[in-house]
Amino acid sequence: MDLQDRLNLLIQTTKLSPTDLERESGIDRMRWSNIKRRSVRAGAPEIEAVAKIWPQYAYWLTTGNTIPEAGQISPDMERVEERKVVNGTP
């Protein structure tokens, strides 16, 4: 999975629309739509914006790795933790 895949996964997981992303980042919603459709590649401004919106995913987004003890997780890790809380599993 490359950075573009991780960025699209994050956008899908959080269910933010291009309009929501524009409001949060100041980057035009058409740019976000084009990134999502893979018409263009995400650049530094979009990556920096996403890291500011979701700082807990910044390391994973850029490297594909996590550091849970430092609070750097992936969306998948967060979903697993949420399921544990809902199911009462430690």
Image (cartoon, grey):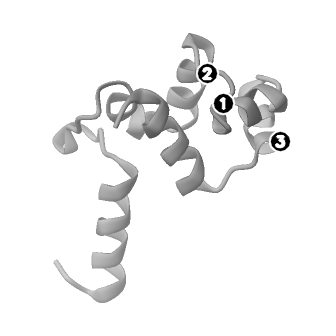
Residue drawn at x 51%, y 45% as measured from the top left: 10
Which mark is in front, 1 or 3? Answer: 1
Q: Residue at x 60, y 24 (%)?
A: 49
- Relative image position of residue 34 (x, y in whole percent): 73, 30
Contact? badges 2 and 3 (CB < 8 Å): no
Which label is found at residue 35? Answer: 1
Q: How many residues crowd around disc 1 within 10 Å: few (fewer than 14), some, or many (20 or more)?
A: some
Q: Residue furthest front?
A: 39
Q: Which mark is residue 46?
A: 2
At 36% from the left and 83% from the top, the residue drawn is 86
Dot 1 or dot 3: first in sequence order is 3
Indicate the position of residue 27 as horizontal and vertical percent values: 76, 23
Looking at the figure, which quarter contains the N terminus?
A: top left
The residue lying toward the viewer, choosing from 42 and 79, is 42
CA gap, disc 2 and disc 1 = 9 Å
Asked if the residue at tag 1 contacts the one at tag 2, i.e. Cβ–Cβ closer than 8 Å, the answer is yes
Q: What amino acid is labelled 3 in the image?
A: Thr
Residue occupying the point 30% across, 67% down: 80
Q: Amino acid at mark 2?
A: Glu
Residue type (three-letter) at the residue carrying disc 1: Ile
* First in residue order: circle 2 vs circle 3: 3
